């Protein structure tokens, strides 16, 4: 009897369509595109600042106040919160379990801790930016 | 009392390496009592309809881990996947991401080698205790890793892992969870030795945390958690090496 194992490769460009679990994962992973866009925006802002030209900086700020840009920022924020932040906070107890004696600290305490830290850091950043006085 | 039966259409992937150039589906119509598992239906086919059908099974009680297959696209232990929870048409395929040996039997050689990489035994740096002494362990210390001892090597996690499917060099969920089980064991001193091999590109860092491995595990082991914890351990170990006086 001859052995001739048959290999069924995973389709490289469409494997994530196979089930809802993979599609959910891909929705999370495409947030990297938003990070890419924000990196480009940051580079644009730094270039405007480092040029020393008040007009270029004003042009950058004006571009951010464009309606399309505001809609993009709002949509990006919602998408990022839903598919990245909430998802990662939900998974945090897996990466950092806490055991107290013979019992595990319930995961929701770790998740709540992350949300609290997030609120504190956000308030600090807003204070630093002069939004909160 | 006679149990109600339901007519099920089983679509089974068949592959005979001596005759077929590629696998194909074959349908069997089976009258299944509601308390049957898919494995019972396969056994019925084998005993009554088609003796050439090949598949692995042994215990029929979720212990041996032999009967892992894709049931309607989901990696499942067929002995704990019940007819009553399935539609009238059920597609049964060999575990995804593994070469097919014949019909529903897959080649597991690759994973067997990877399990060895985990060095799944107690490693000690100091001398072993005298013959009449034991390594003692508290209950709290046992609970740190107990869930990872439940793995039965059914390989459903590998079938669910797209990372392993796309990059077969990835050491994969069960082997990494097994390594973590020993890393967490208070009697073990081999953590850095294991991390040297496993906290690498083909090891934990190849995992992008899809999490499917943990969702499909029939024994509720959480390999995804083990891998994320090993990433933390690997990063700490890496920094320790970079610090002045750290081991090379």
Image: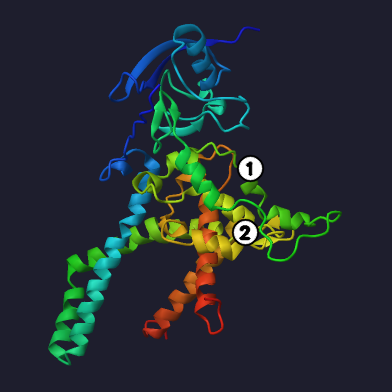
What residue is rendered at 42% in x and 61% in y? A85
Question: B245 and A40: which one is in front?
Answer: B245
Residue B22 at x, y percent in the picture: 29, 25
Q: Are marks 1 and 2 on the same chain?
A: yes
Q: Which residue is mark 1?
A: B150
Q: Quadrant of residue A77?
A: bottom left
Q: How many marks?
A: 2
Residue B1 at x, y percent in the picture: 66, 7
Q: Is residue A102 visible?
A: no
Above or below, A69 against B177 in this view is: below
Q: Which residue is mark 2?
A: B183
Extreme residue in the front direction: A1
Mark pair 1, 2: CA separation: 16 Å
Tag of residue A53: none
Q: Secondary structure at mark 1?
A: helix
Task: Tell whether B121 sits left or right of A30.
Answer: right
């Amino acid at each position: 009897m001859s052995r001739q194992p048959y290999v069924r490769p995973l389709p490289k460009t469409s494997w994530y369509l196979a089930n809802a679990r993979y599609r959910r994962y891909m929705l999370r992973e495409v947030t990297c595109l938003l990070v890419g866009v924000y990196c480009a925006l940051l580079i644009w802002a730094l270039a405007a600042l480092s040029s020393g030209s008040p007009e270029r900086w004003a042009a950058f700020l004006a571009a951010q106040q464009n309606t399309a840009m505001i809609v993009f920022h709002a949509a990006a924020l919602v998408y990022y919160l839903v598919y990245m932040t909430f998802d990662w906070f939900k998974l945090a107890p897996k990466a950092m379990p806490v055991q107290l004696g013979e019992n595990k600290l319930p995961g929701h305490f770790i998740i709540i801790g992350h949300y609290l830290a997030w609120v504190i850091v956000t308030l600090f950043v807003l204070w630093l930016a002069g939004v909160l006085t | 009392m006679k149990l109600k039966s339901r007519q099920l259409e089983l679509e089974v992937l068949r592959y005979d390496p001596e005759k077929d150039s590629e696998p194909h589906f074959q349908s069997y119509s089976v009258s299944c009592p509601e308390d049957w598992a898919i494995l019972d239906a396969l056994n019925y086919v084998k005993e009554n309809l088609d003796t050439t059908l090949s598949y692995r099974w042994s215990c029929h009680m979720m212990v041996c881990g032999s009967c892992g297959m894709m049931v309607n696209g989901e990696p499942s232990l067929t002995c704990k996947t019940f007819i009553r929870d399935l539609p009238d048409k059920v597609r049964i395929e060999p575990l995804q991401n593994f070469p097919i040996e014949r019909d529903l039997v897959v080649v597991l050689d690759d994973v067997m080698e990877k399990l060895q990489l985990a060095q799944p035994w107690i490693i000690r740096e100091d001398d072993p205790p005298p013959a009449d002494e034991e390594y003692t362990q508290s209950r709290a210390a046992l609970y740190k890793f107990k869930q990872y001892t439940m793995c039965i090597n059914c390989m459903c996690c590998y079938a669910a892992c797209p990372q392993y499917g796309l990059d077969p060099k990835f050491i994969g969920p069960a082997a990494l969870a097994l390594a973590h089980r020993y890393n967490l064991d208070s009697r073990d001193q081999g953590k850095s030795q294991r991390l040297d091999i496993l906290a690498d590109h083909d090891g934990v860092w190849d995992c992008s945390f899809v999490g499917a491995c943990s969702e499909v595990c029939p024994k509720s082991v959480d390999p995804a958690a083990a891998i994320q914890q090993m990433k933390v351990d690997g990063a700490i170990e890496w920094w320790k090496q970079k610090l002045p006086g750290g081991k090379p």
